[in-house]
Image (cartoon, rainbow, N blue to C red):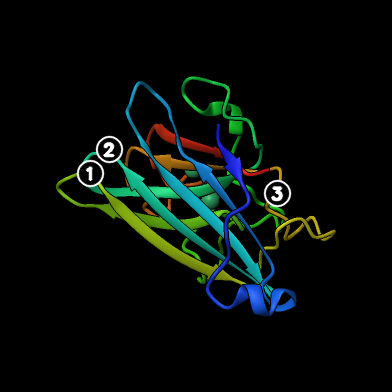
Amino acid sequence: MKLQTITLLAGCALAAASCGTGKMYSIMPKSNTQTGGTAKFIQKGNEVMMKLEVTNLTPGIHAVHIHEKGDCSAPDGTSTGGHWNPSKNDHGKWGNEHFHMGDIGNLVADESGKATLTFKTDKWCLGCTDESKNIIGKGMIVHAAADDFHTQPTGNAGGRVGCIEIK
Ligand SMILES: [Cu+2]
Ligand SMILES: [Zn+2]
């Protein structure tokens, strides 16, 4: 798996202290699919911005979650465990009354199988000492199906077609 520190946004060279850190990962295909693409994470101040660009999905809706283990070794992605849930809440839709810290939501793949998603939150960090916020060491999963935001504890999102080890 490729792992590299990405070049940060324009202007960072002149103001490095305000630019924070960034990471980029290639999405690994799982469950006999061809899922590909990239995931970028940038911490700026107290916010983490995530940008997903996923390829070779089936057209339609696919759930994305952060799972508790940064281990994509299993062919079906189950080595990442369940949803990352440091606050011990029920599964749900991000921002609603109950949700896991890993409940990012759904993305929509077009007819060519491409999907993009940008997500920003101050509830995560990249490598800070607060383990209720730190996403380093976790996994990210793209699912075969949509998250219904209701079924416990998974959202009934089906198989695991793409995986990232956030490290
Ligand atoms: Cu998941
Ligand atoms: Zn969840």
Q: Are marks 2 and 1 in contact (CB under 8 Å)?
A: yes
Confirm if mark 1 falls within 8 A of ligand 1: no
Camera-side residue: 69 or 88? 69
**Is label 2 in a helix, a strand or a loop?**
loop
Q: Residue at x 37, y 37 (%)?
A: 36
Look at label 2 and name its amino acid: Asn
| Residue corresponding to mark 3 | 136
Outermost residue, front side: 14
Place residue 121 in its image quadrant: bottom right
Outermost residue, left side: 111
Q: Position of residue 73 (x, y in %)?
A: 58, 23
Q: Residue at x 75, y 58 (%)?
A: 132
Residue 117 shows up from this direction: yes
Look at label 3 and name its amino acid: Ile
Camera-side residue: 136 or 8? 8
Q: Quadrant of the N terminus?
A: top right
Q: Earlier in the sequence, mark 2 or mark 1?
A: 2
Look at label 1 and name its amino acid: Gly
The relative height of residue 152 versus residue 132 in the rendered view (above or below) is above
The relative height of residue 67 versus residue 130 in the rendered view (above or below) is above
Left or right side of 162 for 116: left
Q: Position of residue 105 (x, y in %)?
A: 43, 57
| Residue corresponding to mark 2 | 56
Camera-side residue: 38 or 74? 38
**Is label 3 in a helix, a strand or a loop?**
loop
| Residue corresponding to mark 1 | 113
Few, some or many residues within 10 Å of mark 3 (<14, 14–19, 20+): some
Camera-side residue: 124 or 53? 53
Q: Position of residue 150 (x, y in %)?
A: 43, 54
Q: Position of residue 39 (x, y in %)?
A: 49, 50
Q: Earlier in the sequence, mark 2 or mark 3?
A: 2
Rounded to the nearest whole Å, what is the CA distance between mark 2 and mark 3? 26 Å
